[in-house]
Amino acid sequence: MAARSADPIPFIDLQAQRRALGDRIDTAIVRVLQSGQFIMGPEVSRFEAELAEFAGAPFALSCANGTDAIALPLMAWEIGPGDAIFCPSFTFVASAEVIPWFGATPVFVDIDPNSFNMSPASLEAAILAVKAKDALVPRVVIAVDLFGQCADYPALTEIARAHGMKLIADSAQSFGATLHGHHPVHWADVQTTSFFPAKPLGAYGDGGAVLMKDRDLAEIIDSLRIHGKASPSDIAAANFTHDARYWNMRVGMNSRLDAIQAAILREKLTIFTRELEMRQTIAERYSARLRDHVRRTPDIIAGGTSTWAQYTIEVDTRDQLVARLADEGIPTAIYYPLPLHQQECYARLSERPVSLEISEAKAGTVLSLPMHPYLTPEIQDRIIAVFEHETKSARTDVLAPAQDGLPFRFDGVYTSENPFPTTAGCGPLA
Ligand SMILES: Cc1ncc(COP(=O)(O)O)c(C=O)c1O
């Protein structure tokens, strides 16, 4: 195989993106420094308007991170003890972490084996089981758009509505992905995202956003993210005797986006659509070349697009592959090695009324490869070559006993074009 390059490959190359933007980020930061407005302000409101327009959402409100973005609607809906909140077990912990913050109970749901996203059938079964037990009230579904693609929103929405529940789309990994041409906020009551630097639309620090259609909800969330400040409706309805900024109408939190992050995100948003196309090209190239060398390459839901936050394959001999890739300077990641219901504190706090066997099985086979819009074909070839080489070695191993026990031996050459040589090139054993 190709000689090992001296340079290790980054998992995500944020510097390549910075180079692509030229001095635009630096200029944007200087603009904020000169404005002297570092928290909220016009830079943040402009970013929110641009974000809302991008996603076709009537309202977009930024906040401090993608975890708060999920917590804010739960707070607005006054979720509390006795409430059941349904979410997948195979996700980043933040999707479930916010539930016990309010004293509510996470109810874990299994995933669809093709998309890694919440299984509508498992959700329905979990809701019915919770209702039958009659100890908790089903209130909210938190669907997660894992690895870059949308969950099955038409099916999940139908179930949530049928049971009188709210639906949150946790799009922290997948902001920008669509299903049948729509962003998840088209179906969900609330779509949330994270601007953690490694996300497809990432800042240079923490950040998050909540997108929604309902004006009243937007007003409440705007209040909650700033310590429960008086909203325009509160001000119109009350006879304030003090500066309205110091009227706190509800118990809220401090979850605001820095103006510098908003300015950076505004620049990144201008190239985001192009970057999503670049990610798509890279993902297609990976899939075409890896298909014959791994247990499975990613499947995208019919009618959907992916942001390819992760390019996640499934493999049989994961430890061996991770070690071989590491030998070649290629980093990998396992998202996620342990489903949440198997983590001690979530096992204790949650309800698990349905089988979570698909989540458990996937935790043993998933492997994410380097993925970012600026991954070059040369670097991708280096990554793919490791898989091709592993296949060749495995096939040599499989055929090796034939040298002793069967009447044919292989004298030809294994290539990626011809990984399964037929008897052509084989001769009878001497
Ligand atoms: C699925 C999912 N939800 C929520 C979050 C939380 O976002 P943040 O790190 O900005 O709080 C993440 C972030 O990694 C995530 O992957």
Image (cartoon, rainbow, N blue to C red):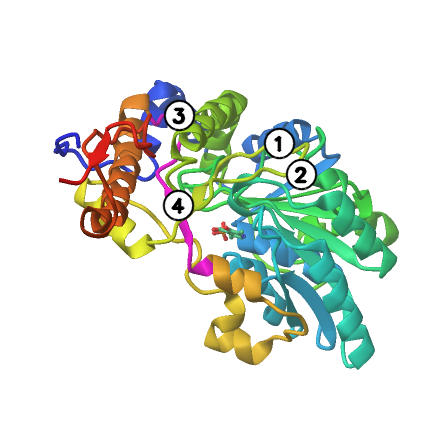
Circle 2: residue type: Ala
Q: Secondary structure at mark 1?
A: helix
Say which quarter of the image contains residue 128.
bottom right
**Of callouts 4 and 2, the N-terminal one:** 2
- Magenta extent: 363-375
* Tag of residue 353: none
Q: For the residue carrying disc 3, how many other residues have a C-alpha within 10 Å: few (<14), some (14-19), or many (20+)?
A: some
What is the tally of numbered marks visible in this picture? 4
Q: Quadrant of the C terminus?
A: top left
Q: Is residue 279 above or below residue 240?
A: above
- Mark pair 4, 3: CA separation: 29 Å
Disc 1 residue type (three-letter): Leu
Residue 323 image offset from top left, x and y in percent: 23, 51
Image position, residue 335 (x, y; %): 43, 53
* Residue annotated with mark 2: 60
Dot placed on the residue nearer the N-terminal end, 3 or 1:
3
Residue bearing the label numbered 3: 25
Q: Earlier in the sequence, mark 4 or mark 1?
A: 1
Tag in front: 4 or 2: 4
Alpha carbon distance from label 4 to label 2: 30 Å
- Marks 2 and 1 in Cβ contact (< 8 Å): yes
Q: What x and y, as percent, mark residue 91?
A: 53, 57
* Badge 3 amino acid: Ile
SS label for mark 4: strand
Q: CA distance from mark 3 to mark 2?
A: 22 Å
Disc 1 designates what residue? Answer: 51
Which SS type dominates the magenta stretch? loop
Residue annotated with mark 4: 368
Residue 372, magenta (yes or no) = yes
